Amino acid sequence: MALRIRSHPPLFVVRRGSIPSLSWRRCLSSECLCLYPSATASFFPTPRSSPPTPFPVRCVQAPAVVNLAPGTPIRQTSILVVGATGTLGRQIVRRALDEGYDVRCLVRPRPAPADFLRDWGATVVNADLSKPETIPATLVGIHTVIDCSTGRPEEPIKTVDWEGKVALIQCAKAMGIQKFVFYSIHNCDKHPEVPLMEIKNCTEKFLKDSGLNHVIIRLCGFMQGLIGQYAVPILEEQSVWGTDAPTRIAYMDTQDIARLTFIALRKENLSGKLLTFAGPRAWTTQEVITLCERLAGQDANVTTVPVSVLRLTRQLTRFFQWTNDVADRLAFSEVLTSDTVFSAPMAETYELLGVDAKDIVSLEKYLQDYFTNILKKLKDIKAQSKQGDFYI
Ligand SMILES: NC(=O)c1ccc[n+]([C@@H]2O[C@H](COP(=O)([O-])OP(=O)(O)OC[C@H]3O[C@@H](n4cnc5c(N)ncnc54)[C@H](OP(=O)(O)O)[C@@H]3O)[C@@H](O)[C@H]2O)c1
């Protein structure tokens, strides 16, 4: 039986034991634009006597120039990075500052401070995508929004990646943001069974229908993620988790993603386009582990989890509401069994961007640099500690 959530009727139709289906279209309907009254109430006050007005978003082209305050033109160099503390977000901030942009970072108040962003020269504003009323103030005076945010693994996927993004896009549209960059996942439209992929697919469509001037960039995987997953545990002689899946991922260095993003941003003919960025070669988990073993000079202690076990765990966690979020994350196991290759031919994209394929970092080079640096540091520390022993 299909149940409707009362507070968000247009957004989710929940079927027991299944993934709530998302609808990008209905979110742009006037019915749905009432979704975030608190976000609009403070920013676009309505007269007390009149009934609450729906959020003013229509699927039309953004006007060429928007002056929120006449006489205060918005500089093209003013950008807001959402998710600036994340793996990709921090590289976007670094690159933007190096290229002379004025960078504002939307950062939620967290125990781990974002001081490093200020030290680099960015300004930091506190907001939280799951609290839509905090978003509008962060967009004042901003020309371009680069959204690198995504819910952390311990958080429910829908809250940030769907509800938060819908609120952000609606606010951006209402406030005349000139360009919006959204990062999605390669082939998200081919895996509706995976909640995060389905959400990315719906958000892409929602953004297109919003009429905002945008660029969507689909990504495959980040080289940086492999450090914590494989390189460090191998060096620390701890076990690494592998699967028996034949899935291949074309990992890319987030510094390359940031560089290519700003090239794409400056090319007017790429507005409204969907680009896919993939690394030079697609790797299986086993190949990555073997490469790390060779560069570290030691064997990995691999615990292999069969994909069938992941799938069973997902089915079990679906039984209980409180483990549904875990099930959503484990849904990738279904993609893993499908012999997927997360890669895309890049020749056309390089040509569009005017980039030389030789300038894109390979995984061998990235990991080689990492292991060379870390092993040198470990050697230095060992040498220093021996010197210390001598004096003691
Ligand atoms: N990682 C990959 O391999 C991969 C592959 C394909 C696509 N992508 C996409 O690439 C983008 C960047 O991914 P990533 O791996 O760099 O992400 P990440 O390291 O997990 O960082 C996520 C960022 O989003 C912020 N965030 C989370 N919830 C928020 C909220 N409620 N309000 C405001 N900010 C919030 C986090 O802030 P806190 O520090 O406060 O948590 C953090 O800065 C995402 O769109 C992701 O889907 C990633």
Image (tube, grey):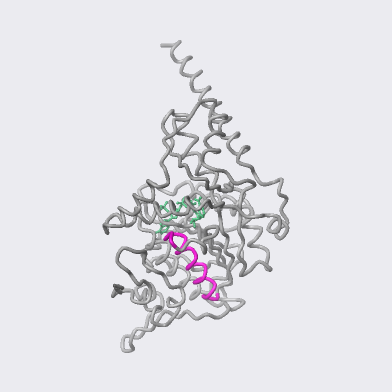
Residue 241 in the image: above or below residue 8: above
**Percent x, y for residue 103?**
54, 57
Indicate left or right for 361 with 378 as reference. Answer: right
Q: Decide whether residue 90 is among the magenta residues.
A: no
Count the marks. 0
Asked where in the image residue 369 lies, by quadrant, the reply is top right
Asked where in the image residue 133 lies, by quadrant, the reply is bottom left
**Percent x, y for residue 286?**
52, 38
Q: Residue at x 73, y 56 (%)?
A: 354
> Along the line of sight, which residue is nearer the eye, 245 or 114?
245
**Percent x, y for residue 242?**
45, 39
Asked where in the image residue 345 lies, by quadrant, the reply is bottom right
Where, quadrant-wise, is the N terminus in this rendering? bottom left
**Percent x, y for residue 72?**
56, 72
> Along the line of sight, which residue is nearer the eye, 264 or 365?
365
Where, quadrant-wise, is the C terminus in this rendering? top left
Q: Main secondary structure of the magenta part?
A: helix
The residue segment tinted magenta is: 193-211
> Along the line of sight, which residue is nearer the eye, 93 or 200?
200
